Amino acid sequence: MPATGVSAQMERNVRTVAKLERDAMAERTMTDRLSDAITRVAGSAGFVAVHAVGFAVWIGLNVGAVPGVAPFDPYPFSFLTLVVSLEAIFLAIFVLMSQNRMSRMADRRAHLDLQVDLLSERENTVMLHMLRSLCETQGIRLDDLDREAQDLLTETDVTALASDLQAKLPEA
């Protein structure tokens, strides 16, 4: 049963999009799942808090602030630097892996959007031809709209449009 205010078509669309997302999530390799999980944890406030506490304890222990505990990594904390550097390297790799996968998914969605847009443009052009024929049959004059309507009745050349856009966009 569709939610209040949501048409049956919108509900079908939402279910379709949700299914596409579930399918994309299910397609992930074990490595993708691992990198996503690590990235999700590393991007949390808890991760920051655990690190802040861990660094404070490490530094406190190694500056002799805790009586009876001999420093095992005295200032300038070379071992801590090594551990943090290795963690940063691996976190960066996992984040890049997740971003690459998300970029591939975004590219697929963009291709799907383009296909739907092209289909919609073609459908609209056909409907305009049909509407124009109906108007002519009924003797309705379109003099004021004729030039604009003529532009819309012409099928869009996507290649020419893309070239024109490329030529007019500023360089990054």
Image (tube, rainbow, N blue to C red):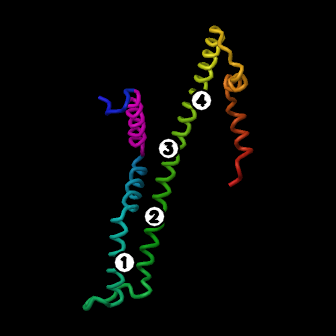
Distance, label 1 to label 3, CA atoms, is: 37 Å
Tell me the quarter of the image containing the N terminus.
top left
Q: Where is residue 116 in the image (x, y as percent from the top left)?
A: 54, 30
Q: Mark 1 points at which residue?
A: 55
As measured in the structure, the alpha-carbon distance from the residue carrying label 4 to the one carrying label 1 is 55 Å
Give whichever of 147, 128 is nearer the camera.
Answer: 147
Please rate how many residues cluster around mark 1, counting C-alpha atoms within 10 Å: few if below 14, some from 14 to 19, many from 20. Answer: some
Which numbered disc, 2 or 4, marks the residue that appears first in the sequence? 2
Residue 137 left/right relative to 41: right
Badge 3 is on which residue? Answer: 105
Up/down of 25 relative to 38, above or below = above
Quick one: label 3, few (<14), some, or many (20+) residues within 10 Å? some
Asked if labels 2 and 3 touch by Cβ distance under 8 angstroms, the answer is no
Please report contact status of discs 1 and 3: CB closer than 8 Å, yes or no: no
Give the residue drawn at x 34%, y 88%: 71
Amino acid type of the residue that numbered disc 2 sits on in the rendered structure: Phe
